[in-house]
Amino acid sequence: MERLLKSPGSNKVPTRIESSDDVANAISQMSSNRVVPVFKVSSKTGAGMPLLQKFLNALPPTASDVELEKLANADQLSFQVDEVYSDVPDVGLVISGIMKRSCIKEDDILQAGPFEGGSFKKVRVTSMHRNRFPCRIVKAGQAAALALTAADEEERLPVMRKGMVLTEVNDAPPVCKKFKAEVNLLFHEKSIKIGFQCTVHIGSVCRTAKILEMSTEKLETNGKANVTFEFLSDYPECIYTDSKLLFRQGTTRGVGRVTSIVALSSTSEPKCDSKEEGVSNDGSMSSDSSMSSSRTSVGDSNSSKCVPIGEENSNDNSMSSDSSDSSFGTSDGDSNSSDDSNSGNTSGFKVCRDESFYGASCTGNQGTLQFAGC
């Protein structure tokens, strides 16, 4: 551990704490932001715990009263969720976290998120606790637990997760799936290249991410680089610039700072999204630019259709006759017996994402492809 702290990527000064004098010296040097106190403790015998408690009790606050007052009067509200308790008896949903900016009062209506697509949902704060005691206001810099309900009694309470934020209604916090960062690689057995996957920690956000771009061809131990991360999930996260990050994978360790974020697209994704693709002669799917430029509505009879299972035959008899010549869903032996004149067709089809029904049938000139779990 001392070797990692002394490495060029960290550039810290580890200090072993073995007496009360070492505690006082370490506290006096904490303002330099380079000294890292190291305590030897035992969870079995309790050895070293008194020195650790003395150090924690003597630590100065991370922010002065003037800075905390400025944060409490900030215009943009931000509460970061650290833990989620989904079913507390007689209470319901309870979240705990740290108030970053502004303040929260009882019965406030806020928005929680981000959910899929970067959306936020309204919630109401019914009660608050600090240090196991009820309170009526939570200011910036304070940790608290909040009991939430849906803002509208007719709506369901959203399912929240660790890493979400609470903001004022109609606020636009920075939501992204991609972000850029300056990183220092503390240790890796070989070298890191584009495509490397790791677990990224940014505050309470803990997600698996992949490196899309790097300023260098490869990154080795004690090296520095500007990289672009992308979260490998459907849900974006609220990430602020200048936030500290830590990434790990196995024995790999690295630290860094978020420099910028790549905001999500402002256009919302349609429920029934047409994805025209062609079928090559070897059976693989290949995109066709001429077809991708022409997106049509579901009701167009001349285009591909997204219809519920069982209704494709009744909607268009011509489609059902064409499906007998389809190469979709056939075995390898059946595909070889298809007409040679149809082997070169690259007609498109549509993939349905409408949540109004469970199953769907995507019909095109190549035939009918049925699937469930739309």
Image: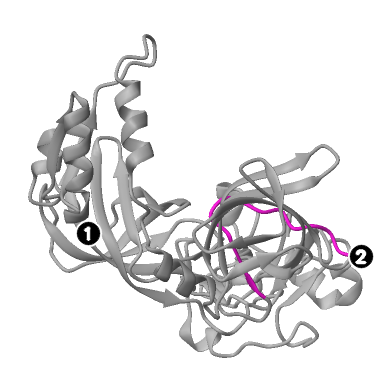
Of the residues shown, which amino acid type is indicated by label 2? Glu
Vertically, is 337 above or below 174? above
Side (left or right) of 105 relative to 174: right
Q: How is the image coloured?
A: one colour
Q: Quadrant of the C terminus?
A: bottom right
Q: Which residue in the protein does label 1 denote?
A: 183
Viewer-proximal residue among 143 and 348: 143
**Does dot 1 land on a helix, a strand or a loop?**
strand
Mark 2 element type:
loop
User: In the visual, does 204 lie left or right of 269?
Assistant: left
Residue drawn at x 42%, y 65% is: 65
Residue type at the position of mark 1: Val
At x 25% / y 58%, what residue is drawn? 256
Q: Is residue 204 left or right of residue 42?
A: right
Quadrant in which the N terminus appears: top left
Q: Residue at x 85, y 77 (%)?
A: 316
Reading the image, the residue beneath label 2 is: 154
Are there few (<14), some (14-19), or many (20+) residues within 10 Å of tag 2?
few
Residue 41, position as x, y percentages in the image:
30, 20
Q: Is residue 352 visible?
A: no
Q: Is residue 42 left or right of residue 124?
A: left
Q: Which residues are magenta?
A: 153-168
